[in-house]
Image: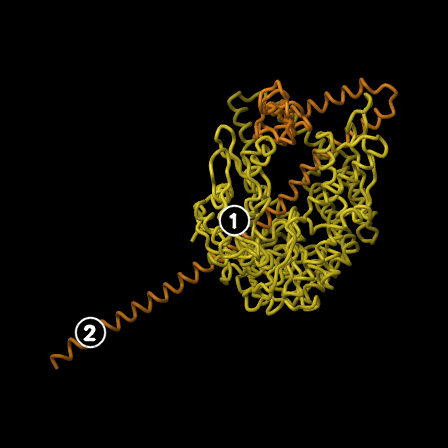
Chain colours: A orange, B yellow
Amino acid sequence: MTSAKPTGKKKHSNEKKDVDLKKEIEQLKQELKENKELLLRSIADFQNYQKRIEKELKLKEYEIKQKYLSEIIDLNELLKKAYNDKDPKGALKLMIDNIQKFFEKEQVKCIDCIGKKFDHNLHHAVTTLEKDNCEDEIIVEEVKKGYTIDNKLLRPSQVIVAKKKEK
Amino acid sequence: MGKIIGIDLGTTNSEVAVMEAGKPTVIKSAEGQPFFPSVVAFTKDGEMLVGEAAKRQAVTNPEGTIHRIKRKMGRGEMVKLREKSYSPEQISAFILQKIKKDAEDYIGEKINDAVITVPAYFNDDQRQATKDAGKIAGLNVKRIINEPTAASLAYGLDKEGDHKIAVYDFGGGTFDITLMEVGEGVFEVLSTNGDTQLGGSDMDKALVDFFAKEFEKKNDIDLRDDPKALQRLYEAAENAKIELSSTLQTDINLPYLTVLDKEPKHLELKLTRAKLEEIISPFVEKTEQPCKQALKDAKLKPSDIDHIVLVGGTTRIPLVRKKVEEIFGKPPKRDVDPMECVAVGAAIQGGVLSGDIDKDIVLLDVTPLTLSIETLGGVSTALIDRNTTVPTKKSKIFSTAADNQTSVEINVLQGERPMATDNKSLGRFHLDGILPAPRGIPQIEVTFDIDADGILNVGAKDLGTGKQQSIRITGSTKLSDEEITKMKKEAETHEEEDKKRKEKVEIRNNGDAMVHTTQKTLEELKDKFTKEDKESLEKGLKELREALSGDDTKKIKNKTDELSKVLQKASAQIYQQAAQSYQQQQQKTSEADSKKQEESWSGKPSGDDKTIDADFKVKDDKKKAGKKD
C-alpha cells in the first residue's frame, strides 16, 4: 500500500511527462513544417526574382541599344548627305564636333599614348619595333585608338612599342 | 558549407562558374569578360600580372610572360621568368588565385573549395599537379574531373541512363575527341584522341592570308608586312567568321587600310559562307581522322554513339557542326554555350558536392501555364505568370463592373490565351454580400497561393465587409507534357486573332466605362456645365450608346474618343472656373497658409490611388457580361 502511492505518483508524473513531450513534439513538428514552408517560399521567391531580373536586364539592354542606335542612325543620315555633297568638309567637321560633344557628355575620353611609356592598364601591345635611339617600352605607333569611360577602361589602345636594339 | 566553384583551367583561356539557387552562373572577370586569359607575367619592376593585363603586355615583355602553362603541367619542368624559376604548378596557381579573387568579389563571400577540370588524357602526375596548383592558390580542390565529363554534366547526360557520348572539343588552339560511356551517373572514358596543333586560330590565319592575297592582286603590296594593317585583318577575319555562322554573306570593308603612293587604300570584298567554308575546310577535315581513330580504339561504330556534345568556340561554325553530323551520323546537342559548358559542368559537380543540388528542396516546380481569372468582357487577367517558381502567392485588387452589384464570380483559368473561353477553367466560386455601391468602388482582393505540392488556393475577400470565399484546386502544376505543348501551341497559332479579339473587348470596355463616367459627371455637375456643353455631352453619350449596341468596333472606338474629348473640354472649363475662384481665395490667405498648401500637393497620395487601381481592373459580373457580348 505504502509503495503504491509513490508508484502512482511516478506513473502520474510520467504520464504528465509524456503529455508534455508529445506536446513539445507536436509543437516542434509544427515549427518544422512552418520553417520548411518559409524556406521553400524564400527559395521560390528568389528564383522568381532571378527570372524578373533576367527580364529586366533584357529590357535594359533594349533601352541602352535604343539610346545609342538612335545616335548612330542620325549620324548615318548625315553621312549620307555628306557623301552626296561636293564639298563635305565643313559638314564633316560639324559632325565630328557633335560626336566629340556626345562623348564628352558620356564621359568617354580618348587615351593619349604616342610617346608615352607602355601601360598594360590602358594599352594592348600588338607588336614591338626595334629602334636605336629610343627608350625602351615607349609607344611609337597607335594601331587603334583606345578609350576610357568614367575613368574606367572602355577599350585599350592597340599600340606598337619600341624596343632598344640589342648591341 | 560554402560555395564550391567550378573551374575550367584551359590552355589559352580559363572559365569559372558557380551554382546559384540551383542554376549555374558563369562568373565574369574583374575586366568584365566571361573568361580569364591563362597568361601570367612579371614586369621589369617585378609586378605580377595575370589574365587580361598579362595578355595585353605579352608582346612587349616576352621574357617575362608565360602562356600555355597547362602543357607543362606534371612534367617536372621549371619555367624561368626574369631570372627566377617557377614550377608549372606555381604559375597555374597564380591564374587560379586571380579566378578565386574575382569569383569572391562576384559572389560576395569567401571561397575555399573548387572543382577543377582537366583533359581526359591527363595522367596521374598531371592531375596531381593540377590539384597542387589549387592548393598553392588557397583552394581546397574537392575533385578533379575530366573536361568531357563536365561538358556532359552541363547537358544533364548523367541522368539519362546507360549510353555512350562523344565529346568533340574544338577550341582556339587544340582539338580533342573523347568517347565515354555513362551508367548510373558514372562516366568512363573509352578512348581519346586529338591534335594539339589544330584550332580556330589556324582558320583565322588562313582567312587573313586570303584577304591579303586579294588585296595584293589589286595593289601589288603584301599587307602582312604592315603590323597596323595585319592587326585589322585579324579583327576582320574573326568578325567574318562569327558573322558567317549566322548569315550567308558578309562585306569586309576596311577603309584607310594602308597608304600607297600617298593615296589611301581600302579593302572592300564580299565573303560568302561558301568561300569561307572552302578556306577553313582543310582544318575541319583534319578532325575526322582522330574521331575515326577514337571510335576504332573504343571498338565502336558511329551508330553506337547516343549523344554528341560540342565544346569550344570553333564548334559554333556551321561547317564544323555539319562535319560532326557526317562523322557520327546524328546531329550534336547544342543548347549549352560550347565556350561555357565545361565550367558549367564543373560548377554542377561542385553543387552536388556541397549539397546545393540533389536535395528535393531546390527541385521546385514551376507553373507550366499562366493562371488567371476572368474579368470584364471575358478577358483573362493573369495573376501568376507561366514559369513562376512555386510555392508562391500573388494578390490583386479588383472591383465590380456594375452599380449596386452585390456578387462577383471568380472563374479560375489556366492557359496562355487572352480570352477566358479559350483557356481551361480550373474552378469557379461566388463571393456574395458585397454592399451595394457604384461600380469600381468595392475593393475585392483576389489571392492565388500555390504551395510546394502544386495545390492552388484561390481566395477572394471584400475589403469593405471582410467577407471571404475560397476554393482549393489540386494539380495546377501537374500537367502532362503533351497538354502543355498543346496549349502553348494553340496560343501561338491564335496569337493574331486573339490579340484582335482582346482589343475588341478592351475597346468595348473602354466605351462602356466612358458612358458610365459621362453619365456620372453629368449628374454630379449638372449645374456647372454650360448649356452647349451639356447638349453636346448628351449627344455624344447617345451616339456612343448606339454604337455599343452594335458590333462595329471601329465605330465604338471613334465615338468613345469623341465623347472623351468633349468631356475633357467641358471639364477643363469647370476646372478653370474653379481655379480662378481658388486663386482669388488664395490671394486672401496668408503666406504661411500657402506653404501648407504646397506641402499637401507634394505629399504622398493616400488611399485615393488604391481606388483608381481598382477602377480599371474590373471584375466581371457574369449576368452583365452575357448581356453585352
The kind of residue on which mark 2 rests is Lys
For mark 2, name the chain. A
- Asked if B503 appears above or below A99 in the picture, the reply is below
Q: Which residue is mark 2?
A: A10
> Crowdedness of circle 1 by 10 Å Cα count: few (<14), some, many (20+)?
many
Tell me residue B627's x, y (percent): 75, 59
Question: Which quadrant does the C terminus of chain B fall into?
Answer: bottom right
- Asked if A71 appears above or below B511 in the picture, the reply is above
Question: Residue B619: in sight, yes or no?
Answer: no
Name the foreground residue: B107 vs B146. B146
Tell me residue B329's x, y (percent): 74, 64
Question: Residue B398: in sight, yes or no?
Answer: yes
Q: Secondary structure at mark 1?
A: loop
Q: Is residue B233 left or right of residue A80?
A: left
> Crowdedness of circle 2 by 10 Å Cα count: few (<14), some, many (20+)?
few
The kind of residue on which mark 1 rests is Met
Same-subunit check for callouts 1 and 2 = no
- Looking at the image, which residue sits at the far left? A2
Q: Which residue is mark 1?
A: B73
Taking the spot 65% from the left edge, 46% from the top edge, the residue there is B172
Name the foreground residue: B438 vs B82. B82
Q: Secondary structure at mark 2?
A: helix
Task: Give the CA separation, mark 1 to mark 2.
Answer: 73 Å
Name the foreground residue: B356 vs B361. B356
